[in-house]
Amino acid sequence: MSEIATGTTSLLRASLSRTGKWAASFAFVSGAVGDVLNPLGPFAAYIALGAAVAALIIAIAMVLRLVLAAKAMPALIFATSAAAIAGGVYGIQQQTNSQNGVIAGLVPAVAELQQSLGIVSQKVAKIEKTVTETQKTLEAVKKSTDTVAKTTEEIALTQTRQTQQGTETQKTVDVVKQTTDTLAAGQQRQQAQVEKLQATTEQIAASIDTIAKGFAQLAAQGGTIADPKRPDEFYHNARVYELAGDMLNARRSYLAFAGFDVDAIDPYTRFATLLRVQDGKAGAREVFGQLAEKAKAPSLKLVHLLQFDDAQRLDKLNAFIAANPDYAPAYFLLAQEFSEDRLGSQTLADKRSEATALTKFVSYEKDGGLLKYFVDQTQLADWLDRSRTRLTALGDVLDPSRFVPTLTPTRSNAGWSMTISLPEPATAISWRLGANGPFTETGMLAMNDQRTGKPMPNPSFELPDSTAATNIGIKYLDVRGRETGPFDIRFDPDSALQQGNKQILDQFWTSWIAFDAGGNRGLVYFTQMLSFRCAIRQVHYSLNGTALDKEIKMPPCDVKDPYAIPSDYQPYFKVKDDVKSMAVQVTYTDGTKSPVREYKRQ
């Protein structure tokens, strides 16, 4: 043991004599360089740490005889010297808190050298950041290395299991590949069938006339087709089964016809009727919903929306027409929504909507424009007959000058009474003076309108006698609560007074003249004409003949009190006893003349 120690001591002395001087010098230079570069980072600490670790590793290797001591000793001396000197420099830096290094603080020339290295000073921040990130990266690498070591063992174990599973996986892949090939072949066959069916469908759609002719021939023959293949054969069978009461087979035949996606309206409307009887409207809606979802024919989609209720059905029908404005059957079906059969009682707006839709439908008859929508031509003939019959019954309902409210003014000494006449029953009436402003309701009478079953609105309202010429707006609610109007009606007080007086004079002309009234023999009274003189321009008369050679001078019309007789005017004149008759003709303010009226004296 003492020999080993003696040998080691000898080796150490020999190595120091050979390498000690240059190792110490080089270590000192390294420490000085680390001190000068201190602004960039604690390089002295890095050198001391690195050298200490190297010295420790070399010493362990020498003890374990992993390397020859003679060869490793110089390196150990160098590493130990570098660690000692760099560690000493780093320690002095920490005690003096020198940012630029100990030498720079003692030797100004070194400090100027550091400042002259501008590129170093500009990159200090960046280098410091890089060093910090490098430290973090080293720590992460260390953690990753540990994880990799652990994972390597797991991978080795997993590879063993994967090797065993590989064989089974390959077998599964082969099966999947075989299945995929089979599916691909099936999809190709299915696509070919779809393309073939699509081509057939297009041919069918283009040959609706052929289908219609085939259906007509089958209908003439009667009986069912044992093995139907064409759409006309399925439709024929459906009709035969339906008329025979075999609803199950009729339903199957209708469904088979629908599978051809023929754009014809009558098969689907008849099928829908059958479904509503069997399954109710909800059932029919469900069946046609499924058909319409797959089909391209607009007729299927149209019949589907007819299975909805009331307002929803009407909204969908209007939307369909907006999207398909030239689809003629839709207008006939729209007319049914406003028909008397559907509503029970129609308002004027309902009649106009029905007439408008029917007129549009019938207009497509020109040049055979409706034939392409019907397989059974008897159904088309029925629709056209019903349309013409209803249009005849509706008359001139579409004439904009007809069926508008009228206003009848009646003047009294107190003012004007305005009577409104409406073209249909109403549930409320409103009016206003002028083109703007709020409307005023006329109110209700203390009685019900038998036509509506609701309180009857008051058809009149009052205006003061000072009302000037203006427009009067009238609007009303029909029996369905829909507002109609407003309608602007011109009101001219002077013209209304004249027209009103004229109407009374014409209606009660037998009261124009009265002979010997009240026992006053020899007097002729014309009191009625005098009371309604605002409508009179002239009055000519003759006695015992029709020469009309005399005139009754009337006092001026007093518009403020039109029916009053002036106190200084006599409403009669005297005649002799030989006067047996009197002829009278009135010229009105509008220029018209009454017939010559003759009055006999009793």
Image: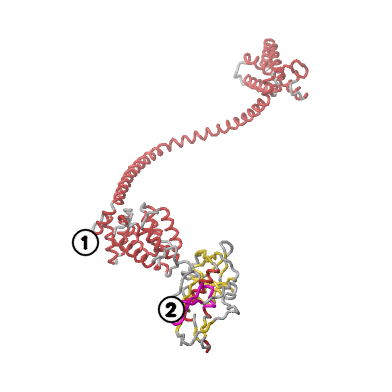
Compared to residue 145, the image places residue 413 above or below, namely: below
Q: Residues within 10 Å of mark 1 (few under 14, many from 20)?
A: few
Three-letter amino acid code at disc 2?
Thr
Frontmost residue, 24 versus 500: 500
Outermost residue toward the bottom in this view:
519
Are discs 2 and 1 less than 8 Å apart at CB?
no
Q: Secondary structure at mark 2?
A: loop
**In screen coordinates, is 557 left or right of 543?**
right
> What range of the chain is rendered magenta?
529-551
Outermost residue toward the left in this view:
221
Compared to residue 4, the image places residue 475 above or below, namely: below
Q: Which mark is residue 221?
A: 1
Mark in front: 2 vs 1: 2
Q: Which mark is residue 546?
A: 2
Frontmost residue, 586 versus 191: 586
Q: Percent x, y for residue 469?
A: 56, 65
- Residue 492 seen anywhere in this rendered image of the structure: yes
Residue depicted at 34% across the width and 64% down the height: 388
Frontmost residue, 231 versus 419: 419
Q: Is residue 546 magenta?
A: yes
Q: Is residue 515 magenta?
A: no
Q: Secondary structure at mark 1?
A: helix
For residue 235, which quarter of the picture?
A: bottom left
Q: Residues within 10 Å of mark 2 (few under 14, many from 20)?
A: some
The quadrant in which the N terminus is found is top right
Three-letter amino acid code at disc 1?
Gln
